[in-house]
Each structure stands twice: as structure tokens, then as C-alpha cells.
Image (tube, grey):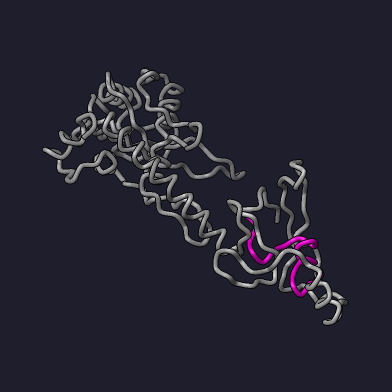
């Protein structure tokens, strides 16, 4: 197992040095179980061997030797957060020496504060989108079976749903994305030419907030000779901003702000499931009390509302 940063390493895996700094000290009793690539105290990238704490064994130091060493130790073992006296050395966090649990709680609180600020930013962003002509786009693909060698084939069809800034559904089309000789496509899928035209008309002149692989649909349509000709300038950015990912799913997760209490990572919300339900999510982000297609959206769409 290989980890890319210390924050991903489970608590039960530590370095030889950290085992030796434990109180009472221990040493590895088993093989290297994982490695982590991160920066050392000099600020240079280094690979560290990790051992399983459960496999560690006591060092040869006697009790009297440990007591003498404790008297010479200048740094105490009591956590400045909770007062606990742990076996492993304390960690520095925000000018205090704390245990791993207290640091984890502090980091959770810091992350929650960052998400609180981000939630306010996303509210302004959502209100701005709802104040102008908007296409809220939901895309799902009908996958083809893998080839005999296990390689992925192009999708058979794509469903593209479009709702406007009031939640009204403008389009719901299942378009064939496979060639005429390819079997297995849904029988009710429209032709590539018809689908490309319907998608282009529904999106024309509107900013696009997309959840799903719309780019894959348009790429297949172009391969089949029916480009949708969408204005790239109208696409809502969906890459990675200076601090946060900007795609619709990531923005939704940031607005929800639900952290996994064990890992501190942002939980990914369940997908809305359709264009009008994605609009409902956007209306919630904008601060609407009700998302019923009437007054709520009008209120949410007002600048500063």
C-alpha cells in the first residue's frame, strides 16, 4: 500500500521513529506494511516506511531506564487540548502541542469554517445563475457491453434533460449515439441528427450548468456527423478553481458541507437524478425557502436575495 500524504495514513500505521518516540517506546515487530510519500522536516519530498502498531514489540529499555529518561525529558506528554497523556508524541497545531484526536477535531472545525464561507459564495453564484436565462442540464449514458478483450465501447445512447431557470423542463431526449450497425441501443432513442438538433435548440442562448457527460454526448454526435454546435462561452466553468473544484457535483457537496467525522473528507451527496431536481438543488443553494417554480425562484433570482 502506498499513500500520497500523511493525512491519508491510518492511525495504526507509523514510522520506526514514531514507535521509538512512544512512551514506553516500541520497535517494529513485523515487515513494512505501507509507505507514504510526503515532505520531511526539511521540506523535501521523502518516502517513509510504515509499520503496523499492532505488530510492534517493546524495546529493550528497562523500567528504571525509562523513568530516568522521563526525568530528563523537557517536553511533557500532556495534551494542551484535552489533558490526555498519550503514548505517542504530541503534535504541533496552531501553536499548541495536542494529541491526534484534538488536532483532528480542530482541523474539522477549521474545515467547517471554510465551508461556511464557501456556502455564502455559492449562494451568490446560484442567485446569479438563476437571474438570467439558464439551462440546467442532466445527462445519463446507456453504456455498451465491453468488447471480448474487455475494452470499453462507445455509449449506445445518451439521455439529455434540460430545465430552465424556473425549473420548467425544456427538453428530455434520448438520443442514439451508436452507429447504425451497432445493436443494443434503446428502441425509443431518436436519431443522432434529431437529437443533436433538439439539444442545440434547448441550450441556445442560455448559460449551461451541466451534471453529467454532456461533452461525451456531443463528441459522439460529431463523430456520427451531427455536431450540436454549442457555444462554449455559455458553459458554466466546471474545472478546478484556485481553492475548490467547480463542477456542479462538487459545488453541491461544498454547499452541503457534510464532513465525514472519521476522515474529515467532504461527503459526496447523492445525485439529484434529473434536470428539474438539479434546478431544485440550485434554488436551495440560492437561498429559496420554497422551490416550487413560483415565488421562490423569483426571490432567489434577485441580486442579493
Q: Where is residue 223 in the image (x, y as percent from the top left)?
A: 46, 23
Q: Quadrant of the C terminus?
A: top left
Q: Where is residue 4 in the image (x, y as percent from the top left)?
A: 67, 48
133, above or below 109, in the image? above
Residue 17 within the segment the image draws in magenta: yes
Locate residue 9 relative to residue 293 in the image: left or right. Answer: right
- Toward the bottom, the furthest residue is 63
Residue at the (39%, 49%) spot, across then down: 257
- The answer to whether one can see residue 293 in this image is yes
Q: Which of 5 and 272 is in front in this view?
A: 5
* Magenta residue span: 8-28
Locate residue 299 relative to residue 6 in the image: left or right. Answer: left
Residue 215 within the segment the image draws in magenta: no
Q: In which quarter of the image is the N terminus?
A: bottom right
Q: Quadrant of residue 156?
A: top left
Residue at the (61%, 66%) spot, across then down: 79
Amino acid at each position: 500500500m502506498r499513500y500520497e500524504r500523511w493525512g491519508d495514513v491510518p492511525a495504526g500505521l507509523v514510522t520506526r521513529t514514531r514507535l521509538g518516540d512512544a512512551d514506553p517506546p516500541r520497535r517494529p515487530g513485523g515487515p513494512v506494511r505501507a509507505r507514504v510519500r510526503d515532505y520531511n522536516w526539511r521540506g523535501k519530498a521523502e518516502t517513509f516506511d510504515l509499520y503496523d502498531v499492532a505488530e510492534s514489540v517493546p524495546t529493550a529499555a528497562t523500567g528504571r531506564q525509562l523513568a530516568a529518561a522521563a526525568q530528563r525529558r523537557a517536553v511533557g506528554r500532556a495534551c494542551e487540548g484535552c489533558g490526555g497523556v498519550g503514548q505517542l508524541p504530541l503534535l504541533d497545531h496552531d501553536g499548541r502541542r495536542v494529541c491526534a484526536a484534538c488536532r483532528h477535531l480542530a482541523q474539522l472545525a477549521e474545515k467547517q469554517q471554510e465551508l461556511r464561507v464557501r456556502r455564502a459564495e455559492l449562494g451568490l453564484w446560484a442567485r446569479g445563475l438563476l437571474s438570467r436565462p439558464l439551462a440546467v442540464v442532466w445527462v445519463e449514458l446507456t453504456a455498451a457491453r465491453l468488447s471480448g478483450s474487455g475494452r470499453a465501447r462507445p455509449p449506445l445512447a445518451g439521455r439529455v434533460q434540460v430545465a430552465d431557470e424556473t425549473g420548467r423542463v425544456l427538453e428530455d431526449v434520448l438520443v442514439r449515439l451508436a452507429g447504425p450497425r451497432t445493436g443494443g441501443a434503446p428502441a425509443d432513442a431518436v436519431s443522432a441528427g434529431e437529437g443533436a438538433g433538439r439539444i442545440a435548440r434547448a441550450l441556445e442562448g442560455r448559460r449551461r450548468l451541466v451534471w453529467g457527460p454532456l461533452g461525451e454526448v456531443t463528441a459522439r454526435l460529431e463523430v456520427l456527423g451531427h455536431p450540436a454546435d454549442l457555444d462554449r462561452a455559455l458553459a458554466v466553468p466546471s474545472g478546478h478553481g484556485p481553492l475548490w473544484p467547480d463542477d456542479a457535483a462538487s459545488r453541491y457537496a461544498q454547499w452541503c458541507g457534510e464532513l465525514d467525522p472519521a476522515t474529515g473528507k467532504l461527503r459526496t451527496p447523492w445525485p439529484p437524478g434529473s434536470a428539474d431536481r438539479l434546478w431544485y438543488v440550485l434554488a436551495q443553494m440560492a437561498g429559496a425557502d420554497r422551490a416550487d417554480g413560483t415565488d421562490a425562484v423569483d426571490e432567489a433570482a434577485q441580486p442579493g436575495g
